[in-house]
Amino acid sequence: MEKIKVTIIGAGNVGTHLAKRFFEKKIEIIQIFSRELQKAEILAKEVEAKATNDLTKINDLADVYIVAVKDDAIEMVARQLPFKSKLVVHTSGAKSSKVFESHIKNYGVFYPLQTFSISKEANFEALPICIFAELASSQLILNQLAKRICPNVYVIDDEQRATLHVCAVMVNNFTNFMYVMAEDILNKEQLKLDILRPLIQETVNKIQKYPAQLMQTGPARREDKQTISQHLQFLEKYPDYHKVYELLSESIIQKYK
Amino acid sequence: MEKIKVTIIGAGNVGTHLAKRFFEKKIEIIQIFSRELQKAEILAKEVEAKATNDLTKINDLADVYIVAVKDDAIEMVARQLPFKSKLVVHTSGAKSSKVFESHIKNYGVFYPLQTFSISKEANFEALPICIFAELASSQLILNQLAKRICPNVYVIDDEQRATLHVCAVMVNNFTNFMYVMAEDILNKEQLKLDILRPLIQETVNKIQKYPAQLMQTGPARREDKQTISQHLQFLEKYPDYHKVYELLSESIIQKYK
């Protein structure tokens, strides 16, 4: 296996977690870029790389350039990179790889499918990395690189990644919003989400083993209209949550008709 | 601690799990009732109790009578019980304890807050049991009984239990529906929910440690309208899920305004 060297553009959540993981796995990091020099320097020191806050100073010594910046900034970064033929990838779930097309010939995606928080260790043993490259030879390099830091590597094209991203929003962001609603109501009624934590855990345990469709329970699944209308009456003082409860109950009833 | 004896009316999910747990913890079970005699007999044998399918044959040897039947059948059971002064409780999250009022003097609730499946072991070490009784002396008995099988016992009145039940629907049933939607879309697009399992697990891990409100991420939280409208465009072929995505995104944006 040849030694792949990387440069990381962006020192936010994704950039930081990737840099640390590469370093841990003894993959050489050439440069860390951040618009804030200090941020770049702190991370660069930790992973024994050089820091810069000037995109035009990014050198051509790396094999893979990982652009881990906000979706809207990816194209701007691509435009300013001082080379055209190196392999450049972004880490976004939502952006097409085509965002690079008019600036970079050799492009792709290196998307760790996870919800990163800067304060929390990323679990690269569990999270999947979705890779894609325009050129087959580049795909091999990305696969090699991803495998070094993560056992679950999937080749996923732009269209599949878009689908995955929609579904990731559902199972991650929307699920969290269910917890937000419950937490908010319980706090306002002098109760605590703690009492529901075992139920929250059990709901997920089931889904790790069985198809979600078979695990659906509850008043809407049973078409228990009396309970649904009691709940909606209770939620009248929470009009936004009332709407959510009503639509989700209708959707579950429709789905199982 | 005096020896509390119980009789269990209903041999469905809740009745079965409770009976087995009482037996495991050496609490004497006098009778098991089920409309289907064979069902009552199988469970009764397992927990060394007597079986009956006749409500009028339920004797007065137990201290607590646990009515673990469908919500709509609770009152009918209460009406037919051949005594008025024994402690009778139901196991429902949705029904008021007042359902007993015109038939039973000494009533209450013994509600294990969990999603039971008949095939799966219930984890009484983790799930909470919510108890309530009209009479303080009965509340003491229920507390003693619950503590014997479960470390997390909460005294929860009818109003609080109604609130908890609404929130349990949100964190359990609605969350599962998020998984159902994702599973359905991924299957139709030749992808698998497996790839999202680590993300599903991570979403819950966070919530076991941090307030849900601080853990909200995603396009709606960032008011990333471009991604939201891409996702909605993708979901046009799934009109029911389109509605859910749209409303939940709006609700998240509103909540964090």
Image: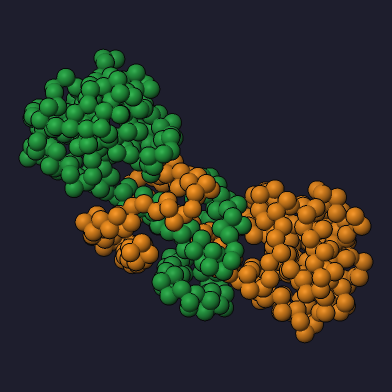
Chain colours: A orange, B green
Asked which quadrant contains residue A179, the reply is: bottom left
Where is B82 relative to A102, above or below? above
For the question of whether residue A18 can be seen, the reply is: yes
Q: Residue at x 21, y 56 (%)?
A: A226
For the question of whether residue A51 can be seen, the reply is: no
Where is B100 relative to B252, above or below? above
> Is the C terminus of chain A in the top left, top right, bottom left or bottom right quadrant?
bottom left
Q: In this view, does B135 lie to the left or right of A61?
A: left
A184 or B115: nearer the viewer: B115
Q: List x then y, in percent, for residue A175.
A: 47, 57
Residue that lies at the very extreme toward the top in this rendered image: B2
Where is A93 relative to B42, above or below? below
Q: List x then y, in percent, for residue B179.
A: 48, 58
Q: Residue at x 39, y 42 (%)?
A: B117
Asked which quadrant contains residue A35, the reply is: bottom right
Q: In this view, does A149 lie to the left or right of A165?
A: right
Q: Residue at x 28, y 26 (%)?
A: B44
Q: List x then y, in percent, for residue B39.
A: 27, 34
B147 or A252: nearer the viewer: A252
Q: Which residue is drawn at 86% across and 79% down?
A: A84
Where is A164 relative to B134, above or below? below
Q: Total label count?
A: 0
> Is the N terminus of chain A in the top left, top right, bottom left or bottom right quadrant?
bottom right
Residue that lies at the very extreme toward the bottom in this rendered image: A102
Q: List x then y, in percent, for residue B127.
A: 40, 37
Q: In this view, does B138 lie to the left or right of B249?
A: left
Q: In this view, does B80 lie to the left or right of A253?
A: left
